[in-house]
Image (cartoon, coloured by chain):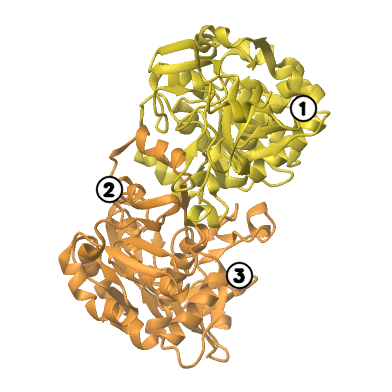
Chain colours: A orange, B yellow
């Protein structure tokens, strides 16, 4: 069967999950998408559920255009040849200042898969050929889907130039914070995690032990070279800046979902202590490639981050859990 | 006369200006200071008045210990040999992490001349030998004193990695903002200044024209690679972050003196646009040396920044002017 040829006529249908508008998710048949110039049709095998997917369903997101098939942590294979890929969920112009200086995640004409264009919560997805990142045979698809979130954490560490031997404090022991700790470890630095929900600390104990993550009480008086928020409360910023040594760096990895205001006196500390606060949003292809290597090396540990393999129909029922409970990573199998 | 020998007995007196406590400044005779191991006694020829001096007099400062002879923008000569120097107003331990990584201005045992120890509003000052930066014969002392404030602006540009060809928006056309523009120009970047006080723009017209600084209305819709506050209102931060291109850098060069709070939504922009906010506080010896070179090259332009040469007795009368009026740089001649 050659899906690409058959796209034109008759139209083939596929199972998909569409966010019609904020709060309204439909599991339904939709046409297999047309393949445009420079694109490829990918058969999706796995798509992980990101907290941002749940957030988009609940309250929208800056870059979301509805109706939309969500899902941007995708693994699949091409119809000819069956080569397996994860995708960089971006389509960058390659010509703007941002692309030229290596920050293609800030491309001025960026279209994000699962945000501006349809994503991986479907049997098929079209992807720019240039966004395909090949994966080795020994990397299972349900682990490979973590390449995108892991790459985002690598981007965070690069934004504040995390150095070998440094101590890095991470707010939040959700999947993002835990992957961040893995990335920190890969930089030969030391990950510490603060998590206010004791249940979250419990469910990831196995992963923490394997990676060598220090948690909570052990470091109440410590100051850190680097602090990163992998949790969306403004408190992470209010408290985190005070945990930095002079000259230290804070990475705003997670956007805030609450709206507490921030006293000018705290921002003044950035001046007096020569702190650096850097935002991180998304990742680049280079970072996804690096993530694939790390996942391949540590697949037997990363597997502890998977909460459950689910079907497309189950996604809507896990969104509320992701937003409110102590859960690890849900991976949709197609 | 050998001042150093005569320090021990009998005690010689000198004219000095002492901040007894916040708001209380005394012009009085005090003993010429003892010279400790590793120090030198410098005969002060010039000491410029920094806005921070006026701020310390009015409201104190984090690093100020009173009673104190203020003044940290110092030029003078050694008693033997009459070699001329400006000083790096720091005494760093040389052994802590900060010193070892080249950020000696953040030294964990830092003592700042004119803050923790007595400064240049006096006929003599003792300075660590290691903090002396020689100046060339052709650089007049009243220009040389600007090496320290200029070095602080160089530190600011280095903190956000200002690149050649970039557009840099500076808030504030006081002496610090104008020196910042000079430093920007020396990086082959393009300085733009916003100043809310039209009088301030008027009095520095000559300097602006010589350097090639663009001001106000000309760039209302422009976005910038870099923004720096050389003004102490929180508004510079609230407005300035919005003037940045994606991936741009904001330098918190001036501490805030007002206490407006900052909405979390603005800090969220740091995340979404991958902005960088970096504090700058003080400078290093290397930056003072660079500043001396720039001043020597541009002494005929920098002279336009001098408002008036004054005596030690006049300092108390210029503090209120510095805090409230459109004035350039006052330089004390001793």
Q: Is residue B109 above or below residue B97?
A: above
User: Which residue is drawn at the image coordinates 22% and 77% (left, top)?
Assistant: A205
Residue A281: assigned label: none
Label 3 or label 2, whichever comes before in sequence order: 3
Chain of the residue displaying label 1: B
* Residue B200 position by quadrant: top right
Contact? badges 3 and 1 (CB < 8 Å): no
Q: Are marks 2 and 1 in contact (CB under 8 Å)?
A: no
- Spatial CA span between label 3 and label 1: 49 Å
| Residue on which the image places disc 1 | B212
Disc 3 packing (10 Å; few <14; some 14–19; many ≥20): few
Numbered disc 1: secondary structure:
loop
Mark 2 — on which chain does it sit?
A: A
Q: Is residue A106 left or right of residue A97?
A: left
Alpha carbons under labels 2 and 1: distance apart: 44 Å
For label 2, the residue is A235
Q: Are marks 3 and 2 on the same chain?
A: yes
Q: Which residue is mark 3?
A: A36
Q: Is residue B277 visible?
A: no
In this rendering, the label closer to the viewer, 3 or 2: 2
User: For numbered disc 3, what is the local secondary structure?
Assistant: loop
| Observer able to see residue B62 | yes
Q: Which of B84/A31 is in front?
A: B84
Where residue A131 appears, as percent x and y from the top left, is 57, 72
- Residue furthest left in the image: A199
Q: Nearer the viewer, residue B265 or B279?
A: B279
Label 3: chain letter: A
Do the numbered discs 3 and 2 sit on residues whose CB atoms are within 8 Å? no
Q: Secondary structure at mark 2?
A: helix
């Amino acid at each position: 069967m050659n899906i690409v040829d058959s796209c034109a006529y008759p139209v083939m249908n596929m199972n998909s999950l569409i966010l019609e508008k904020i709060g309204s998710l439909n599991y339904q048949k939709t046409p297999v998408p047309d393949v445009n110039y420079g694109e490829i049709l990918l058969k999706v095998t796995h798509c992980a559920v990101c907290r941002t997917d749940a957030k988009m369903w609940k309250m929208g997101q800056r870059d979301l255009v509805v109706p939309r098939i969500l899902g941007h942590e995708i693994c699949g294979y091409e119809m000819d040849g069956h080569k397996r890929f994860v995708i960089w969920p971006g389509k960058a112009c390659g010509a703007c200042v941002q692309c030229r200086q290596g920050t293609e995640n800030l491309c001025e004409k960026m279209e994000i898969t699962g945000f501006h264009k349809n994503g991986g919560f479907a049997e098929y997805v079209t992807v720019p050929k240039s966004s395909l990142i090949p994966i080795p045979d020994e990397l299972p698809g349900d682990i490979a889907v973590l390449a995108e979130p892991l790459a985002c954490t690598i981007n965070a560490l690069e934004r504040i130039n995390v150095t070998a031997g440094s101590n890095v404090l991470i707010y939040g022991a959700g999947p993002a914070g835990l992957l961040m700790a893995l990335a920190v470890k890969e930089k030969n630095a030391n990950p510490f995690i603060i998590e206010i929900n004791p249940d979250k600390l419990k469910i990831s104990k196995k992963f923490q032990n394997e990676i060598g993550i220090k948690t909570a009480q052990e470091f109440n008086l410590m100051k850190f070279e680097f602090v990163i928020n992998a949790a969306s409360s403004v408190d992470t910023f209010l408290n985190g800046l005070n945990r930095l040594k002079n000259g230290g760096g804070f990475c705003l990895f997670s956007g805030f979902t609450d709206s507490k205001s921030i006293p000018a006196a705290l921002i003044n500390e950035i001046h007096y202590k020569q702190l650096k606060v850097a935002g991180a949003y998304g990742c680049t292809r280079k970072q996804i490639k690096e993530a694939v290597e790390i996942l391949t090396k540590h697949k037997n540990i990363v597997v502890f981050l998977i909460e459950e393999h689910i079907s497309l129909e189950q996604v809507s029922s896990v969104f509320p859990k992701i937003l409110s409970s102590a859960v690890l990573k849900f991976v949709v199998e197609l």
